[in-house]
Amino acid sequence: MSPIDRRAAAILGWCAAILGLALTVSDALGLKYSQEIVWPTDLTAFQHIETGPIDVALIGSSRTTFGLAPTAIDACLSDTLARPTTTYNLARVFASMATERSVARDLLVGEHIPALAVVEIAPEILAARHHEHTYNTASQVDLADVPACLSMVRSADDLIACSRAPVRGVENLAWLLSGERADINHLNWMMIHQRGGQFCFGSAVCEEHNRRFEGPLRNRWQMRIERILPTLTEERFGDWRIGAGQGHEALLELIAESRERGYDLLLVNMPVHQVYRDEIPPEDYAAYLDYITALSEEHGVPIFDANTPQWNHARDRFYDPDHLSSSGALLLSRALCARIAPMLRKESSATQNWK
């Protein structure tokens, strides 16, 4: 080996060692979710707070972030079950089933294992390839996921996204040390004091927070109508498939992992307004309903379907075609409470009988 070759090998070796060390330190500090990405909830804060026993963990996309409020759910559950309960919202932007499974795998561990995980489903979330696949890959893939990631590469952007996994430790440490991780929209405050999500209820401070947050969203409805809906069918359902591929496999993995770790699952079909629903090809939505019905029966996982005409036509419950307003979130949180209270009562009884 020539001196130049030895020097090149030494440089590559040092680079690999530095990347490996940075990744190890980043993982040890729980910095995977400390990224230059506006997460709907502060997942990093959740990893570092003492939660006590968790009754319900909410996992999903921004629809879950806006549509389900832990404070409203716990107020209802506590009254219904006659005991204090604790719910956390762990949703993230552009969630696919693969990223939901990753959030559950990373965060629902040890003392953070809940009695019940409420997991959002949607035609987009369960697609064989999510419409934001490249974005999700760049922000979520771990080293162990790289081979599967490479098998789904369709473009140079996909390949670059897969390559982010080895350097994520450096990225996360640099982002943390830069001090740029601002408390955007009070995400840190919401997680630490209101258990996550975008809306909270039960205090004057929460009422002020909701008003302040919704103020800038007044034009959101028209903006989404003009910018998102015209291309929604092509971008999200142009090559849409369900029942195989990444979405299907990730859901099966999540079901298996929940049983290994000892928590129950409830799949929730979040509501969208009819103007959004109209852009989903009817045959695709029918295939989606057939799929989740069959999966529920085969694997014994219940479904709470809130995407019904009662919700689809209620304009005052939405701030845009597929995200609920604070008033909609309050109503849906109470509806979810009614659905899960019997599940938690059964869980509590089983625990008491075991003791």
Image: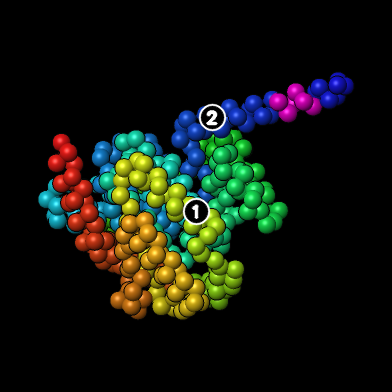
Numbered label attached to residue 249: 1
- The answer to whether 176 appears left or right of 82 in the picture is right
Q: Is residue 177 visible?
A: no
How many neighbours does mark 2 have within 10 angstroms: few (below 14), some (14-19), or many (20 or more)?
some
- The answer to which of 210 and 328 lies nearer the viewer is 328
Q: Position of residue 112 (x, y in %)?
A: 33, 39
- The answer to which of 304 and 169 lies nearer the viewer is 304
Residue at horizontal 41 percent and vertical 70 percent from the top: 289
Residue 11 highlighted magenta (yes or no): yes
Q: Position of residue 77 (x, y in %)?
A: 19, 54
| Helix, strand or loop: magenta stretch | helix
**Label 2, on which residue?**
24
Residue at horizontal 26 percent and vertical 38 percent from the top: 52
* Amino acid type, callout 1: Glu
* Amino acid type, callout 2: Thr
Q: Position of residue 60 (x, y in %)?
A: 41, 56
In which image quadrant can residue 10 be found? Answer: top right
Range of residues picked out in magenta: 8-13
